[in-house]
């Protein structure tokens, strides 16, 4: 059973942002320190990637572990109420992510997915971003 009333849950869910989230801000801060030039939320690309490095033909997707079903403790959480709805919603998000990544790669873009849980360790986050920025050719290590 949910500990919040339906009205409280509705307010909580409505307050969740899709742009300029804390994990996204942490990634952008690390990119700023690496002196990378980027644009945000390009509507011209499949899925409107969070961060686009146009000169390098690279995109960075910043995913919340719960919403995009990451294989970590945050992504494995299963809501107890309305579970069928949430399972379907999260599976649809996962399928959409896969379609968008494929479309981006097909269009010649390199894709890096940064998971919310990865942003908790700033050193590893910066290292991952640095490796991605300096990579000359597309490799499978940037895939989920």
Image: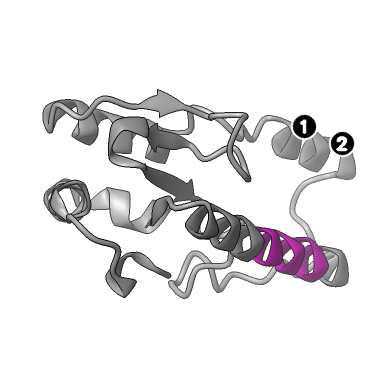
Residue 74 in magenta?
no
In contact (CB < 8 Å): disc 2 and disc 1: yes
User: What segment carries the magenta color?
Assistant: 86-96
Of 126 and 133, the residue lying toward us: 133
- Residue 117 in the image: above or below residue 57: below
Determine whether the residue tagged by mark 1 lies in a helix, strand or loop: helix
Q: Position of residue 90 (x, y in %)?
A: 71, 63
134 left or right of 111? left
Quadrant of the snapshot with the N terminus: bottom right
Determine whether the residue tagged by mark 2 lies in a helix, strand or loop: helix
**Residue identified by numbered label 2:** 7
Looking at the image, what colour scheme do you see?
one colour
**Other-residue count near label 1 (Cα within 10 Å), few / some / many at <14 / 14–19 / ≥20:** few
* Badge number at residue 144: none
**Other-residue count near label 2 (Cα within 10 Å), few / some / many at <14 / 14–19 / ≥20:** few
Quadrant of the snapshot with the C terminus: bottom left
Residue 94 in magenta?
yes
Q: Main secondary structure of the magenta part?
A: helix
Of 117 and 6, the residue lying toward us: 117
**Residue identified by numbered label 1:** 11
Q: Position of residue 114 (x, y in %)?
A: 37, 53
State the image quarter where residue 23 is shown. top left
Residue in the image at 50% along x and 68% along y:
70
- Residue 10 in the image: above or below residue 41: below
Residue in the image at 46% along x and 26% along y:
40
């Amino acid at each position: 059973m949910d500990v919040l009333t339906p009205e409280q849950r509705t307010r909580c869910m409505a307050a969740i942002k899709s742009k300029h989230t804390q994990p996204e801000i942490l990634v952008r801060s690390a990119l700023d320190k690496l002196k990378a030039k980027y644009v945000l939320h390009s509507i011209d690309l499949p899925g409107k990637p969070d961060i686009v490095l146009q000169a390098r033909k690279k995109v960075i997707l910043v995913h919340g572990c719960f919403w995009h079903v990451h294989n970590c403790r945050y992504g494995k959480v299963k809501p107890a109420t309305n579970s069928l709805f949430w399972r379907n919603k999260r599976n649809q998000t996962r399928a959409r992510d896969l379609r968008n990544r494929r479309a981006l790669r097909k269009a010649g873009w390199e894709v890096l997915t940064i998971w919310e849980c990865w942003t908790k360790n700033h050193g590893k986050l910066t290292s991952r971003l640095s490796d991605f920025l300096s990579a000359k050719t597309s490799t499978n290590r940037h895939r989920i």
